[in-house]
Image (tube, helix red, strand yellow):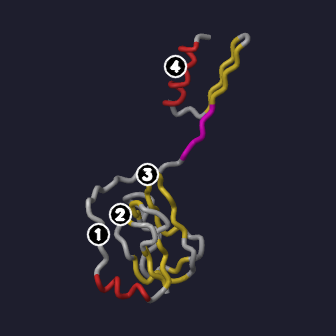
């Protein structure tokens, strides 16, 4: 089998929905496999300016337990536009529960709570850019 044919075969398998492919011919055996990666498609909203929290929210940051952003990216409250938010104000959450998604470099990162408690305030809006260490939720 010619190298060009093998290269073309690799491209075809890579661009298809196949996850595995094998081919045998006299003295030649080819096996190709690829991992399936689950992706969440969410539209990106372009914003040039990071939205600032209102002064009253900043003043209240000293009180309560905060779930903070572990990375820089775009905050999403739900897994898709038409899905319910992971958590809302008034919800009781448990340690390890997914509370949001932060998209960073085209990767969707699920954010889990390090605490148990009741969500007192959601401090960011869906689609808003967030910074490392920025408070996302206040718990009591």
- Along the viewing direction, whichever of 13 and 4 lies nearer the viewer: 4
Return the disc, 1 or 3, that comes first in the chain's sequence.
Answer: 1
x and y, in percent, of residue 48 in the image: 26, 59
- Residue labelled with disc 1: 51
Q: Nearer the viewer, mark 4 or mark 1?
A: 1
In which quadrant is the N terminus drawn?
top right
- Residue labelled with disc 4: 8
Q: Which mark is residue 61?
A: none
Q: Is residue 25 left or right of residue 103?
A: right
Who's the residue at 47% across and 66% down the image? 100
Return the disc, 4 or 1, that comes first in the chain's sequence.
Answer: 4
Q: Badge 2 local density, few (<14 within 10 Å), some, or many (20+)?
A: many
Q: Badge 1 local density, few (<14 within 10 Å), some, or many (20+)?
A: few
Spatial separation of the CA atoms under disc 2 and disc 3: 12 Å
Q: Badge 4 local density, few (<14 within 10 Å), some, or many (20+)?
A: few
Marks 2/4 in contact by CB < 8 Å: the verdict is no
Answer whether residue 108 is magenta in the image. Answer: no
Q: What range of the chain is rendered magenta?
A: 33-37
Who's the residue at 34% across and 83% down the image? 57
**Numbered disc 1: secondary structure:** loop
Marks 2/1 in contact by CB < 8 Å: the verdict is yes
- Residue labelled with disc 2: 129
Return the disc, 4 or 3, that comes first in the chain's sequence.
Answer: 4
**Numbered disc 3: secondary structure:** loop
Spatial separation of the CA atoms under disc 4 and disc 3: 30 Å
x and y, in percent, of residue 5 in the image: 55, 14
Q: Which mark is residue 105?
A: 3
Spatial separation of the CA atoms under disc 2 and disc 1: 8 Å
Marks 2/3 in contact by CB < 8 Å: the verdict is no
Who's the residue at 55% across and 24% down the image? 10
């Amino acid at each position: 089998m010619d190298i060009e044919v093998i290269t073309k075969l690799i491209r075809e398998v890579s661009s298809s929905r196949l996850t595995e492919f094998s081919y045998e011919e006299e003295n030649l055996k080819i096996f190709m496999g690829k991992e399936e990666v689950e992706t969440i498609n969410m539209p990106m909203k372009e914003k040039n300016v990071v939205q600032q929290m209102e002064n009253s929210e900043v003043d209240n940051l000293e009180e309560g337990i905060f779930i903070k952003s572990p990375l820089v990216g775009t905050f999403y409250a739900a897994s898709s536009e038409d899905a319910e938010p992971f958590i809302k104000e008034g919800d009781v959450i448990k340690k390890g529960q997914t509370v949001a998604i932060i998209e960073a470099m085209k990767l969707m990162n699920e954010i889990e709570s390090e605490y148990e408690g009741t969500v007192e305030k959601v401090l960011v809006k869906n689609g808003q850019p967030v910074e490392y260490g920025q408070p996302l939720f206040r718990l009591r």
